[in-house]
Image: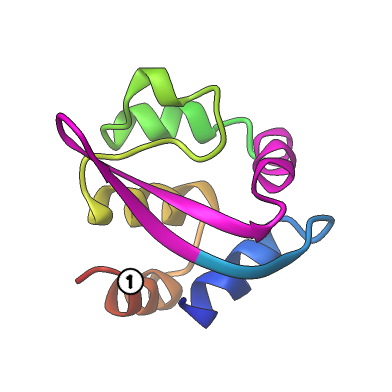
Amino acid sequence: MSRFLAFLLSRAVPEARVEQVKIACWTVKRSAYFIVVHPYHTEYWLYFHKRYPQYKRLALKHGAGRHSLEYCCPEFPTRGDLIDWLSDVLSLSPGERNLLRLVEVR
């Protein structure tokens, strides 16, 4: 778990509880990276969608699967695409973007 990622998501949606965050990946036909938020994953993303309506447009720009836009966190083909999307949606500063990439992109 990244404490920095948890801090960013908590700051982004202060009305939702964030205890733990991890980046997960499906690998069926292709890789699909997304963020899991504990303890209330679905509730967190519902608040996120309301607060950041531009999330869909930016998700498509970063290669998210169109099928994943209505669910919780959009699914991206790479971990880097996911991090870039989140950075854009949250309008992170250059320093925050760089730190997030250092911590989360392996």
Res. 48 image quadrant: top right
Range covered by the magenta-colored residues: 22-51
Q: Is residue 29 left or right of residue 4?
A: left
The residue at the point 45 percent across, 74 percent down is: 96
On the image, numbered disc 1 is attached to which residue? 104
Q: Residue furthest top?
A: 67
Which x, y percent locates residue 68?
43, 26
Is 61 or 35 nearer to us in this picture?
A: 35
Label 1 element class: helix
Does residue 1 sit above or below 16 in this rendering? below
The residue at the point 72 percent across, 52 percent down is: 40
Is 26 or 89 nearer to us in this picture?
A: 26
User: In the rendered structure, does residue 33 fall within the stretch colored magenta?
Assistant: yes
Figure quadrant of the C terminus: bottom left
Q: Amino acid at mark 1?
A: Glu
Q: Residue furthest right?
A: 15
Q: Is residue 45 left or right of residue 66?
A: right
Which x, y percent locates residue 20?
60, 70
Q: Is residue 6 left or right of residue 94?
A: right
Which x, y percent locates residue 84?
33, 53
User: In the rendered structure, does residue 46 fall within the stretch colored magenta?
Assistant: yes
The residue at the point 30 percent across, 40 percent down is: 76
